[in-house]
Image (cartoon, helix red, strand yellow):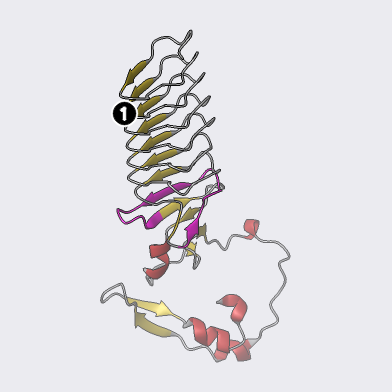
Amino acid sequence: NNTTGANNTAVASNSLDANTTGASNTALGLNSLGANTTASFNTAVGASALKTNTTGGANTAFGVEAGFAIVTGENNTVIGRSAGIATTASNNTFIGRSSGSQITSGASNTIIGRYQGNSGGLDIRTSSNNIVLSDGDGVPRLRLDSSGDLYVQRVYDNTTGNGANVFVGSDGQFERSTSSQRYKNTVNDATYGLAELLTLRPVTYKNNNDGDTVFGGLIAEEVHDAGLTEFV
């Protein structure tokens, strides 16, 4: 079917079989870039890699069925067997076997490891601009979302009695904790008096994860029970 497409390399049955004007494509493996017609600058290595791509250019796929469902998406890099097998979008980078394999319309995502796009309580199948680092079992360990917010779930469970300059939410989101007035509004005098303060019990303690280091302070539950919840 090739008409004016130049500088293409096709090795194996049905590779670049439908190409017409697409140029500078490399297809190595059965059915690799088999549906490509006018797209250029694609590299597909592995059986059925970029098999259904027609007009999407500048994609790179290494591995059996890597980037299989990309039709018009561009600038994707998928490395690993079945990596990005369901994605139809552009600008994704998936590295690892089955990496990003459940991502469909989500674009501009980066996944390193075997996280598929919906596991470990994290579903980004249709979400864009995420960065996910996962382990070999596909469990997400670190994520930067589209706003640039950082989430590390394990940090929420790994406590310390040292200064709390960073707040970690139960979902693992990091936020800087500050008492500076410039980050506050509607500041009013508290109505609590000496009576509430005198119910507080200063203590020394050792934190579960800090060995024999001794800290001084208050117990959050006791501050709450004294009616001073806003200060916890």
Residue 209 occupies which quadrant of the picture? Answer: bottom left
Locate residue 36, reporting x and y percent: 47, 24
Residue named by callout 1: 29
The answer to which of 60 and 5 lies nearer the viewer is: 5
Q: Residue at x 34, y 48 (%)?
A: 113
Q: Is residue 45 above or below residue 197?
A: above
Locate residue 127, reporting x and y percent: 55, 48
In the rendered image, the quadrant that contains the C terminus is bottom right
Locate residue 176, reporting x and y percent: 51, 58
Residue 138 occupies which quadrant of the picture? Answer: bottom left
The answer to which of 67 and 92 lies nearer the viewer is: 67
Q: Residue at x 37, y 58 (%)?
A: 139
Residue at disc 1, secondary structure: loop
Q: Amino acid at mark 1?
A: Gly
For the record, the magenta segment spans 121-141
Q: Main secondary structure of the magenta part?
A: loop
Q: Residue 214 lies in magenta, yes or no? A: no
Locate residue 225, reporting x and y percent: 56, 89
